[in-house]
């Protein structure tokens, strides 16, 4: 009984250590950007993958916890730029922090969703990575719709630099325009980030020592 308790503590200590390292890696990688949108959002160097790995290796509880810590760090580093000039009230700043950083980060912890359902590790982790990115995109979409939807008309007129802006403005208005705006804006960085993340997740899980960490032969 004593040995079992000691082994459990040792296992949890290892998980905590690995999770902390993965959070640090994700944070560092988030500063290495292929592109960055002027109004928030960027395409980074696989910054989602370490948090996804925690969720895949140790389960949703550990993954979501690591994602929340990662999201809090991202809030500290990024929220001032996201809300600069927006004239937000304190509760809007809090909602932005929750949806764009903390909840969005927590969603990355669901990378192990398909681990028990699909035996092929590349497929299960790749699909889990896609699912996690989709949940993260939904969180960003909600933030864009609720908090930044009023910028939709300006974005399509002059801020987006897109040829089809006039067509969108002639087709949509009001809340629907805000929905379209948030869908498109957040897709411009989440779509390439998701592709990069899924590809890297499949590559990472092919490394045999890492598979052993996840309890996969």
Image (cartoon, rainbow, N blue to C red):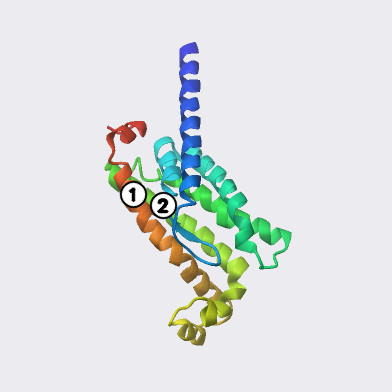
- Which mark identifies residue 104? none
Badge number at residue 45: 2
The residue lying toward the viewer, choosing from 143 and 46, is: 46
Label 1: few (<14), some (14–19) or many (≥20) C-alpha neighbours in 10 Å = some
In percent of width and height, residue 198 lies at 35, 52
Q: Residue at x 41, y 58 (%)?
A: 193
Q: Residue furthest top?
A: 2
- What residue is at 50 percent from the left and 17 percent from the top? 5
Q: Nearer the viewer, residue 91 or 1?
A: 91
Kindly report which numbered mark, 2 or 1, lies closer to the viewer in this rendering. 2
Residue 182 lies, in percent from the top left, at 52, 69
Q: Which residue is under mark 1?
A: 200
- Please say if the residues under marks 2 and 1 sit with CB atoms less than 8 Å apart: no
Q: Quadrant of residue 117?
A: top left
First in sequence: mark 2 vs mark 1: 2
Give the secondary structure at mark 2: loop
Residue found at the far right of this picture:
89
Location of residue 86 in the rendering, given as x and y in whole percent from the top left corner: 66, 68
The residue sitting at 51% across, 45% down in the picture is 67
Query: Does residue 42 appear anywhere in the picture?
Result: yes
Residue 173's place in the image compared with 143, above or below, is: below
- Side (left or right) of 134 relative to 80: left
Whether residue 39 is situated above or below residue 73 in the rendered picture:
below
Asked if one can make out residue 1 in the rendered structure from this viewpoint, the answer is no
Looking at the picture, does residue 163 appear above or below residue 69?
Answer: below
Does dot 1 land on a helix, a strand or a loop? helix
Q: What number of labels is visible?
A: 2
Residue at position x 32%, y 43% from top?
204
Give 188 or 7, whichever is nearer the viewer.
188
**What is the distance, in whole Å, between disc 2 and disc 1 at their CAs?**
10 Å
């Amino acid at each position: 009984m004593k040995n079992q308790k000691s082994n459990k503590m040792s296992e949890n200590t290892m998980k905590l250590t690995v999770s902390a390292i993965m959070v640090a890696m994700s944070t560092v990688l988030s500063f290495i950007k292929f592109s960055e949108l002027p109004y928030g959002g960027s395409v980074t160097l696989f910054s989602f993958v370490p948090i996804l790995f925690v969720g895949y290796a140790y389960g949703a509880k550990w993954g979501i916890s690591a994602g929340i810590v990662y999201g809090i760090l991202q809030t500290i580093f990024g929220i001032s730029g996201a809300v600069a000039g927006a004239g937000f009230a304190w509760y809007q700043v809090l909602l932005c922090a929750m949806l764009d950083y903390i909840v969005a980060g927590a969603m990355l912890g669901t990378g192990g969703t398909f681990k028990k359902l699909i035996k092929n590790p590349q497929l299960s982790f790749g699909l889990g990575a896609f699912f996690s990115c989709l949940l993260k995109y939904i969180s960003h979409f909600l933030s864009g719709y609720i908090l930044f939807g009023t910028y939709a008309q300006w974005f399509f007129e002059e801020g987006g630099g897109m040829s089809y802006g006039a067509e969108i403005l002639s087709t949509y208005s009001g809340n629907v325009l805000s929905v379209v705006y948030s869908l498109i804006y957040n897709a411009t960085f989440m779509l390439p980030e998701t592709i990069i993340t899924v590809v890297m997740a499949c590559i990472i899980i092919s490394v045999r020592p890492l598979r052993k960490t996840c309890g996969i032969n």
